[in-house]
Amino acid sequence: MALQGTCREINDIAIIDFSGKITLGEGSSTLRRTIKELIDKGHRKIVLNLYDVDYIDSSGIGELVSGYTTVRNASGELKLLHLTKRVHDLLQITRLFTVFDVQSDEDTALRSFR
Amino acid sequence: MAAKTQRIEITLETLLESVDLAEVIVMRIAEAAGFSEEDIHKMGMAVREGVINAYNYGNQQIRDKKIFMTVELEPDKMIVRVLDQGKGFELTEVPDPLAEENLLRTSGRGLFLMRAFMDEFNVHTAPGGGAELVMVKKLPEPVSGNGS
């Protein structure tokens, strides 16, 4: 299934609930476009809820990294929420688990913003 | 009579759609061969990364070029080869994506993932040019039914 995301806001935090695959092509493009739109709208606290994303390839990982850098360069914070086991394992073996702020609980994620 | 190797040769177009197609083909063959669900997933991902590499880096997304995939099924393992029509490359030339200075790079993890997901992985430069990625997954040894 192509990546789809729906945005909800809690206070000044944008939470994007994603479902589908983050892979080369449409999925990666959707992720890139979503983060860019959020930044353009002024959002600086962003949570990517990946509860329903069970598949990501190297392009998708690259796009997550790009999103992290984009948000950071805009003086914002990006957090990942509810990683599935496969995505979790991929971020582990690529050492990106040490880069991203990964949360397993939404309330905790929301409270963790500076 | 010794078991024979089954061989399937597929020519893919240099199109984004070929990435999904190659993945599905290999996963179906792996399933038929008796690999576990987890191994099927890993093989699919590895082949996906291999064809992405051929599409993006080998063939530079040039539509006229082809990607040649071969699947060989031996009694104890499956070998997948992905050959592009590019210039070839050496694995030693590829930056380590796990190095601290490379962690925030947005590309360069495909080869690493292939190596991580398969039991054996290597890259050759084909005689006619082009990079050939060779990846091997071993079938688990059958468990003996004799208890003692």
Image: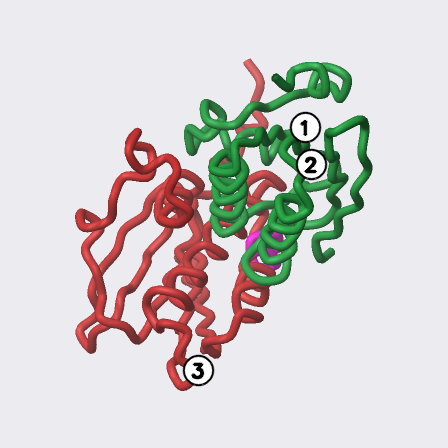
Chain colours: A green, B red
Q: Are marks 1 and 2 in contact (CB under 8 Å)?
A: yes
* Residue at numbered disc 3: B63
User: What secondary structure is the stretch in magenta mostly built from?
Assistant: helix
Q: Which mark is residue A50?
A: 2
Identify which residue is drawn at 34% across, 68% down.
Answer: B83
Identify which residue is drawn at 39% across, 60% down.
Answer: B53
Q: Residues within 10 Å of mark 2 (few under 14, many from 20)?
A: many
Q: How many numbered circles does the render carry?
A: 3
Q: Which residues are magenta?
A: B27-32
Q: CA distance from mark 3 to mark 2?
A: 34 Å
Q: CA distance from mark 1 to mark 2?
A: 6 Å
Q: In the picture, which quadrant includes the C terminus of chain A?
A: top right
Residue located farthest toward the front when viewing the structure as drawn = A42
Q: Position of residue A66 (x, y in %)?
A: 48, 44
Query: Which tag, 1 or 2, sits closer to the chain's start?
Result: 2
Q: Amino acid at mark 3?
A: Arg
Q: Amino acid at mark 1?
A: Leu
Q: Residues within 10 Å of mark 3 (few under 14, many from 20)?
A: few
| Foreground disc of the pair 3, 2 | 2
Residue B61 or A112: which is nearer the viewer? Answer: A112
Residue A3 or B16: which is nearer the viewer? Answer: A3
